[in-house]
Amino acid sequence: MKKAHVAKLFDRLCAVLPEPESELDYSNPYTLLVAVVLSAQATDAGVNKVTGPLFKRADTAQKMLDLGEARLKEHIKSIGLFNNKAKNIIALSRMLVQRYGGEVPRERASLQSLPGVGRKSANVVMNAAFGAPTIAVDTHIFRVCNRTGLAPGETPHAVELKLDKVVPPERKLHAHHWLILHGRYVCKARKPECPSCVIRDLCRYRAKTTLEAPATAAKHARSGKAPGKAPAR
Ligand code: SF4
């Protein structure tokens, strides 16, 4: 995608949501870290349901250790892989208390040394808790970047490296949330909402959805003609 188009793409996503935020509920870097660990293969809404009561009991590493693994499991048992996640949360809390004075470290290497915390989770915490210009590539961002041509790549890491090169510096802080929310609510996996998408004229996805009646769409498909283009902006 051309540099000018990348700039336009972020201008438009910014116009829709100037101050995007995580949909995970948290009150400090520690609760964000725990929420991120819980969110692997789970929805943010499902995570928020359990973290509300959990964080009332334990919103620091020491309080989580005091709560203990068995009671933690009781809180998070509606979340997938909860046994493993509980083990990781207790182990990372212990490490935070023993090595980092109970604080969440800001550096990638230290974050990734914590049990259950990979590159993607570290990027989320660095960005949302500490304001670092990192972009965590999840399934939504991976799809949006490949469909639009913004940062195509075969793996999340390849997409992340490409994003790092193409996203304008002044857009990097919020790029993660703009792209994830766009993928979650507009550029959806099964049926993207192309007709109402604010970046449709910039997007290179060939199979854009249209508002055409099914019979007309079928006619286009048979004739091989592309339906009308979205108006240029
Ligand atoms: S035009 Fe369609 S495919 Fe392209 S970004 Fe928008 S919703 Fe996604």
Image (tube, grey):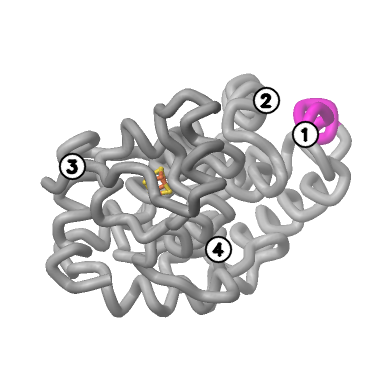
Neighbours of disc 4 within 10 Å: few (<14), some (14-19), many (20+)? some
Marks 1 and 2: in contact by CB < 8 Å?
Answer: yes
**Which amino acid type corresponds to the residue marked 3 in the rendered image?**
Pro
The CA span between labels 4 and 1 is 19 Å
Q: Secondary structure at mark 1?
A: loop
Residue 212: horizontal and vertical position, in percent? 42, 28
The region drawn magenta spans: 71-79
Q: Nearer the viewer, mark 4 or mark 3?
A: 3
**Which amino acid type corresponds to the residue marked 1 in the rendered image?**
Ile
Q: Nearer the viewer, mark 3 or mark 2?
A: 3
> In this view of the protein, which residue sits in the foreground, 190 or 102?
190
Q: Earlier in the sequence, mark 2 or mark 4?
A: 2
Circle 4 sits on which residue?
120
| Labelled disc at residue 198 | none
Circle 3 sits on which residue?
231
Neighbours of disc 3 within 10 Å: few (<14), some (14-19), many (20+)? few
Among the 4 quarters of the image, the one containing residue 195: top left
Q: Earlier in the sequence, mark 3 or mark 2?
A: 2
Q: Earlier in the sequence, mark 3 or mark 1?
A: 1
Q: Secondary structure at mark 2?
A: helix
The CA span between labels 2 and 4 is 22 Å
Q: Secondary structure at mark 4?
A: helix
Q: Quadrant of the N terminus?
A: bottom left
**Which amino acid type corresponds to the residue marked 4 in the rendered image?**
Lys
